[in-house]
Amino acid sequence: MTKRTIVLADDHHIVRQGLRALLETERDFAIVGEASDGLEAVRLVERLQPDILVVDLIMPALSGLEVVHQLNGRAEKTRVIVLSMHKNEAYVLEALKNGAAGYVLKDSTAAELVKAIREVSAGRKYLGSPFSDSAIDAYVQRAKGAPLDAYEKLTIREREVLQLKAEGHTIAEIARRLFISPRTVEIHRTHLMRKLGLHSQTDLIRFALTRGILAVEGDGAERPPSPPLFPRDSTTAED
């Protein structure tokens, strides 16, 4: 039996454990790696080249949307399913625009995630409920037609520096995380601030919060302290 290889990326260890336990009950699924932040997810996928990456939308070091963006074209074998608390259509559009093949809400059932993995691994796109399957083409077309904003004009490295700086990391810490010199970090920070029209660390943090790169602490709609695990259905989707 050919197994579908899967990498799980979520910064909550208990969520990854729950997902692993649920997905490993499927005989044709194999969890080959786990990542606790976005940078680790990108590097792990590039190394392992799994069939599927299931990634949380809000992640430290690199957001789930940015993970999708970076892997688009760099890990052609891997198809990405975004796992999210957000029902807002804007997040769905952004995920599809960045190259995601699926979008599933965290309060969905295990059967729905299994179905998403099977659909996506078969080369199709999948939007979990409450998003209509018939609306996928419309979502994709709208995502493709949306104009670029200032953030999308940043380089990959500038996006990485933006998130790490917004999270409060020092220049030296960012340099170590990205394997570049502190001077290079400073240059990227200067460039991204100019491109985004930002003038201070407060402006940068506000932008990251507005953009959805950072979660609003204490806001259950953004990042609950204990994200729900998938309740196991009595029925599981099959091929």
Image (cartoon, rainbow, N blue to C red):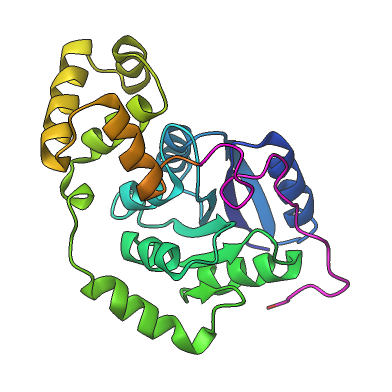
Residue at the image point whose x is 37% and y is 20% from the top = 177
Is 229 rendered above or below residue 171? Answer: below
Is 211 rendered above or below residue 148? Answer: above
Could you tell me which quadrant the N terminus lies in? bottom right
Residue 94 in the figure: left or right of residue 237: left
Q: Is residue 199 visible?
A: yes
Residue with the most extreme right position: 234
The quarter of the picture where residue 163 lies is top left
Point out residue 187 in the picture as x, y percentages from the top left corner.
Answer: 13, 22
Residue with the most extreme bottom position: 134
The quarter of the picture where residue 96 lies is bottom left
Residue at the image point whose x is 83% and y is 63% from the top = 232
Question: Magenta stretch: residue 107 in it?
Answer: no
Could you tell me which quadrant the C terminus lies in? bottom right
Residue 174 in the figure: left or right of residue 2: left
Taking depth in this image into account, of 20 and 170 the one nearest to the observer is 170
| Main secondary structure found in the magenta portion | loop
Q: Is residue 122 visible?
A: no
Question: Magenta stretch: residue 229 in it?
Answer: yes
Give the residues in magenta: 216-238
Point out residue 127 in the picture as x, y percentages from the top left corner.
Answer: 53, 74
Taking depth in this image into account, of 100 and 225 the one nearest to the observer is 225
Q: How many marks?
A: 0
Residue at the image point whose x is 84% and y is 75% from the top = 235
Residue at the image point whose x is 51% and y is 41% from the top = 216
Taking depth in this image into account, of 196 and 78 the one nearest to the observer is 196
Point out residue 101 in the picture as x, y percentages from the top left corner.
Answer: 45, 67
Residue 86 in the figure: left or right of residue 168: right
The quarter of the picture where residue 114 lies is bottom right
